[in-house]
Amino acid sequence: MPPGAVLLFIHFLLASSVYAQKLTNRTIDDTNGDSVTGAVPVYTPEAVWDGPSCNGCAILPNRAQTFDGTYHAATYNSGLRDMEISMSFTGASPCSSRSLAIKRFAGVAIYVFFILANHVADGITTTTAANFSIDGTYRGTFNHTPSTSTDFEFDALVFAQTGLENATHTLVISTQGPNDIYVNFDYAKYT
Ligand SMILES: *[C@@H]1O[C@H](CO)[C@@H](O)[C@H](O)[C@H]1NC(C)=O
Ligand SMILES: *[C@@H]1O[C@H](CO)[C@@H](O)[C@H](O)[C@H]1NC(C)=O
Ligand SMILES: *[C@@H]1O[C@H](CO)[C@@H](O)[C@H](O)[C@H]1NC(C)=O
């Protein structure tokens, strides 16, 4: 191996071991909340949200396939004007005194997982859509058009944002507009 390649390899080993050691994911379950702080998401309007033990809900994903056996689901209609899920998380980056190399990996990140529904029954809305904002700034939109399958899609990554600064952030998932929309939030992960 040429010396340059050896150095690169050592750098890679160091960087990957530091990465594996220092950056970990925490979960925010829809119901049980943050795996470390216990903080739970806030749902508005509160009354429209239901979980797996809902009586009379048309859309019932198999709870055994959900994270922690829980989810929060609701069907938005234009009369609600705005439906939201809000949660805070603090990105704890690696300690900056360790090494300069670590800094490149020091961005914090958040990942949001929904349960997506497809064909359930005629007249049942299973289109999913939401806007995502962090600290009041719009960051992205997710849309799911149901297929003719009756299968649900679990652990569907609907939003990912990396490179956030080391601070407390607030993520808001909102649904607005004229159409009926199904939203099912299972969990989020943050780094
Ligand atoms: C955290 O989870 C996301 C989404 O599953 C994954 O892409 C990422 O590599 C994970 N990060 C760490 C540090 O485990
Ligand atoms: C991230 O913020 C925490 C809390 O303010 C602080 O203890 C830590 O040193 C910070 N890390 C970096 C890399 O700035
Ligand atoms: C996302 O935001 C846009 C712009 O405000 C809005 O027109 C649209 O209805 C929103 N979509 C959802 C699903 O809330």
Image (cartoon, helix red, strand yellow):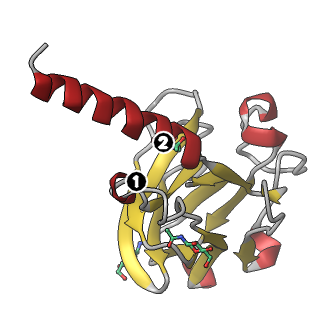
Tell me the amino acid under the disc marked 1. Ile
Tell me the amino acid under the disc marked 2. Val
The answer to whether residue 143 is left or right of residue 115 is left
**Ligand 2 quadrant in view:** bottom right
Q: Residue at x 90, y 47 (%)?
A: 53
Question: Which of the two residues, 116 or 86, is positioned nearer the viewer here?
Answer: 86
Residue 57: x percent and y percent? 79, 50
Which of the two discs, 2 and 1, labels the residue nearer the N terminus?
Answer: 2
Question: Which of the two residues, 35 or 3, is positioned nearer the viewer here?
Answer: 3
The residue that mark 2 highlights is: 18
Whether residue 171 is situated above or below residue 10 in the rendered picture:
below
Residue 74: x percent and y percent? 69, 62
Q: Residue at x 76, y 31 (%)?
A: 62
The residue that mark 1 highlights is: 102
Q: Residue at x 82, y 39 (%)?
A: 69
Quarter of the image with the C terminus is: bottom right
